[in-house]
Image (spheres, coloured by chain):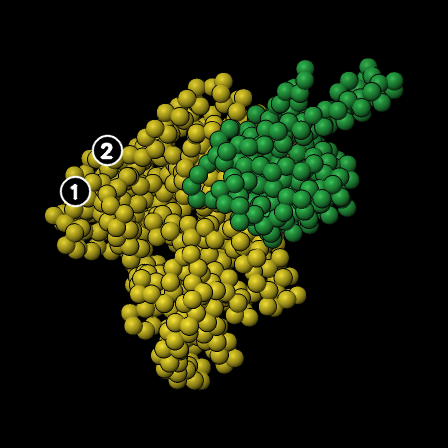
């Protein structure tokens, strides 16, 4: 069991794109379904559908190494720590003064010196190593240039001392720094999320920016002109980053490093997949069919894997913009987990004008537009002749299911991720979590549980937690990750027995909820 | 859909938010979308058949993104184009500078591409004349200097939009006609469709 996990991780670390193929014997007959990776409900049949890490470790692996380095007993560490907090104290008053003077330049957006601006739960700033503002989640970069300057001063101060500044804790606020040359990302959070979690979110933002420009171009720009104002090139893309931040708060997929599927009879899904498979072209690498934020299917070139982060960046791009609704889109996109150096070219179009079904064809060739357009045409022709298209449209009418179907009265909601396929499933939010605040609160609880299960030094296998509003159980095996939310009336014994019942239900429904037979061309 | 043959490749160029997408949207779908502005990502392609005299010509319109981020890509969109609609916002003089940049680029790289200079959002200056930042005659003079047609359009009201694309199609048609008559003696039977410019698979 553990050996398997180890191997898969190793294959990631050595940079192989293909995950280790695992034996999947007895998947259907397994008495305790899914305790072993590869036999859990939702595990694909042959190989993974896209590249996915075991968990989110890959995102924080580097940061962790840094953390380890930092925690090694090295000279003046603790001392520096103290210096920071005094420094932060001093600087924050300076910030306030500065932002007062700059308040005239406040844009159409928010007044950065206002209480409202300060009271946001999470701020994210991106700046260049020269301290030039690149992005702020709230307010305008201009109004914040002095604040960014202070941040940069902090970063360079510490770097000069050969320490890498990682985080500052003050006033119920965590300030987290991520230096990804030539960019520096700063998160300021009051959410109680762990440092690791915040770093992971900053990584996502970093990848978002790289996906628009490539790292090669970023490096090139700043090598030539340290002082370059990157906002020129990012103009009009801020909403992508805004949206990604919102998703990080709300989308279980980003938390679980997994993707969810449109529930669809496997017979219909297989037809859709094979129609996509048939519509191939020389430079076509990935064909992705989305229904809103859900994957219908993904067909890929043999031996090429799409990392879940890259897939989420694609989801974010498509989901954030209505611009692909007009005709057929053709855009360069860097998939940073695949390759930070170059652009792919994505043909993005909806199957029908008002449809939620969006097809993304990723090619390596920038001249490939008409080839991709033809692939889409061939796919559509094949599909429209078959009943699968109708089945898919039917499925779209109820893209979600109610937790009541599971038949466990106390169970309110859950997240289940199959580790080997990197796919997860989750029912719609029940009545009690209808408002945005409630949904975000529940996501926050899941995040806490997730942090406990993935604690860098003391990870837990399972965790039960009672509170006034709900009881929660989280459980991780080498095969799956499961988060359950029960009514506050339930008991621990009940929760434990519910797990088995739920796993059996997922096993029964797995054909519909997951992509079990991914195809390649 | 795009599988239909495209006769003439038309590219929309201009600074971001000058209204290229709105222009195409008005022309192709006869509507003007209100709501928050959504900048184009990369480029969008749409094929639109248009009646010219007895004939139907299909324009393959490339609506490019104005963001500088995509500047390096722009060649693939205008290469081989028969017409370029270079847009600027009548209420924004910086966008006129950007239009001049595109004109230069086209003159250098795409000499066979006909240029249509288009001042957008004319409804705004009709509402408030002081909003106009580019004098009509200045724009007209510039257009003459570069041998371009000049239009002032409003995608909001639809004013001049159909006229613009109609002109593009007619100009294409008459030049294609010339091209065809030149070809006739040479190779009529074999290359029946050769006068159709195909923007697919060039190279
Ligand atoms: N009043 C008025 N507003 C317009 C007109 N055309 C466009 N707009 C507005 O200008 C903004 C930008 O329009 P788009 O058509 O998206 O601009 P674009 O040139 O495609 O921008 P990019 O895709 O970023 O290059 C939108 O808010 C439109 O509503 C017009 O004719 N009149
Ligand atoms: Mg546009």
Residue B75 is situated, as x and y percent measured from the top left of the image, at 69, 44
Q: State whether discs 1 and 2 lie on one chain.
A: yes
Say whether residue A508 is visible. yes
Q: Which one is in front, B56 or A487? A: B56
Specify whether A41 is left or right of A467: right
Specify the chain shown as green: B
Q: Which one is in front, B188 or A75? A: B188
Q: Mark 2 points at which residue?
A: A405
Q: Label 1 lies in what chain? A: A
C-beta proximity under 8 Å, tags 1 and 2: no
Q: Which one is in front, A440 or A46? A: A440
Distance from mark 1 CB to nearest ligand 1 atom below 8 Å: no
Q: Label 2 lies in what chain? A: A
Residue A129 is situated, as x and y percent measured from the top left of the image, at 54, 69
Q: Name the residue under label 1.
A: A410
Q: Which one is in front, A44 or A398? A: A398
Identified at 16% across, 55% down, the residue is A467
Specify the chain shown as yellow: A
In this view, the residue farthest toward the left is A489
Q: Is mark 1 on a helix, strand or loop?
A: loop
Residue A326 is situated, as x and y percent measured from the top left of the image, at 52, 34
Mark 1 is surrounded, within 10 Å at the Cα level, by few (under 14), some (14 to 19) or many (20 or more) other residues, namely: some
Residue A65 is situated, as x and y percent measured from the top left of the image, at 46, 67
Specify whether A120 is left or right of A155: left
All told, the count of numbered labels is: 2
Establish if A328 lies above or below A70. Answer: above
Q: Which of marks 1 and 2 is nearer the N terminus?
A: 2
Establish if A148 lies above or below B14. Answer: below
């Amino acid at each position: 069991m553990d050996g398997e996990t180890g191997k898969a991780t190793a294959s990631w670390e050595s940079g192989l794109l293909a995950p280790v193929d695992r034996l999947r014997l007895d998947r259907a007959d397994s008495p305790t379904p899914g305790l072993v990776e590869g036999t859990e409900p939702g595990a694909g049949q042959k190989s993974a559908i896209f590249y996915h890490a075991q968990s989110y470790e890959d995102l924080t692996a580097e940061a962790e190494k840094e953390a380890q380095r930092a925690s090694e007993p090295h000279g003046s560490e603790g001392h520096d720590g103290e210096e920071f907090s005094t420094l932060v104290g001093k600087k924050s008053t300076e910030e306030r003064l500065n932002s007062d003077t700059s308040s005239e330049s406040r844009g159409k957006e928010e007044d950065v010196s206002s209480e409202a601006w300060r009271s946001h739960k999470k701020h994210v700033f991106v700046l260049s190593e020269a301290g030039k503002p690149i992005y702020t989640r709230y307010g305008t970069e201009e109004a914040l240039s002095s604040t960014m300057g202070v941040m940069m001063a902090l970063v360079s101060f510490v770097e000069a001392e050969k320490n890498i500044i990682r985080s500052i804790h003050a006033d119920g606020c965590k300030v987290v720094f991520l230096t990804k040359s030539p960019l520096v990302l700063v998160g300021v959070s009051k959410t109680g999320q762990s440092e690791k979690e915040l770093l992971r979110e900053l990584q996502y933002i970093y990848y978002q920016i790289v996906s628009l420009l490539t790292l090669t171009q970023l490096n090139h720009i700043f090598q030539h002109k340290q002082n370059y104002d990157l906002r020129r090139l990012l103009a009009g893309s801020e909403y992508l980053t805004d949206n990604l931040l919102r998703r990080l708060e709300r989308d279980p997929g980003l938390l679980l490093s997994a993707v969810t599927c449109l529930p669809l009879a496997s017979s219909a899904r297989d037809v859709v997949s094979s129609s996509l498979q048939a519509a191939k072209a020389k430079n076509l690498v990935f064909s992705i069919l989305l229904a809103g934020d859900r994957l219908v299917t993904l067909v890929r070139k043999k031996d090429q894997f799409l990392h879940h982060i890259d897939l989420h960046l694609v989801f974010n791009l498509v989901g954030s913009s209505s611009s692909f609704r007009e005709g057929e889109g053709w855009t360069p996109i860097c998939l940073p987990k695949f390759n930070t150096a170059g652009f792919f070219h994505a043909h993005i179009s909806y199957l029908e004008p008002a449809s939620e079904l969006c097809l993304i064809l990723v090619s390596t060739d920038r001249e490939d537009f008409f080839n991709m357009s033809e692939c889409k045409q061939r796919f559509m022709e094949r599909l429209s002749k078959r009943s699968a298209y109708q089945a898919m449209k039917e499925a779209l009418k109820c893209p979600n299911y109610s937790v009541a179907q599971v038949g466990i009265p106390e169970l309110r909601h859950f997240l289940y991720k199959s580790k080997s396929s990197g796919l997860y499933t989750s029912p719609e939010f029940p009545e009690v979590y209808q408002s945005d605040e409630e949904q975000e609160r529940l996501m926050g609880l899941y995040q806490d549980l997730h942090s406990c299960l993935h604690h860098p030094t003391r990870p837990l296998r399972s965790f039960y937690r009672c509170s006034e509003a709900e009881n929660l159980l989280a459980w991780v095996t080498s095969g799956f990750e499961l988060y359950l939310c029960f009514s506050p009336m339930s008991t621990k014994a009940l929760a434990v027995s519910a797990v088995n019942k739920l796993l059996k239900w997922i096993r029964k429904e797995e054909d519909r909820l997951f992509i079990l037979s991914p195809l390649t061309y | 859909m795009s599988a239909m043959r495209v006769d003439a490749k038309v590219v929309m160029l201009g600074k971001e938010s000058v209204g290229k997408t709105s222009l195409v949207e008005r022309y192709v779908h006869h509507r003007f979308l209100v709501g928050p502005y959504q900048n184009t990502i990369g480029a969008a392609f749409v094929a639109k058949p248009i009646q010219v005299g007895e004939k139907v010509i299909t324009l393959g319109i490339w609506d490019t993104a104005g963001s500088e981020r995509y500047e390096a890509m722009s060649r693939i969109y205008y290469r081989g184009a028969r017409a370029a609609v270079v847009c600027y916002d009548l209420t924004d003089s910086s966008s006129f500078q950007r239009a001049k940049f595109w004109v230069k680029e086209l003159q250098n790289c795409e000499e066979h591409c006909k240029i249509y200079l288009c001042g957008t959002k004319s409804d705004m200056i009709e509402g408030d004349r002081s909003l106009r930042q580019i004098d009509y005659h200045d724009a007209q003079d510039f257009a003459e200097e570069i041998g371009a047609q000049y239009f002032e359009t409003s995608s909001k009201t639809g004013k001049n939009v159909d006229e613009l694309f109609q002109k593009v199609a007619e100009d294409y048609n008459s030049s294609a006609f010339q091209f065809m008559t030149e070809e006739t003696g040479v190779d009529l039977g074999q290359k029946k469709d050769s006068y159709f410019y195909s923007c697919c698979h060039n190279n």
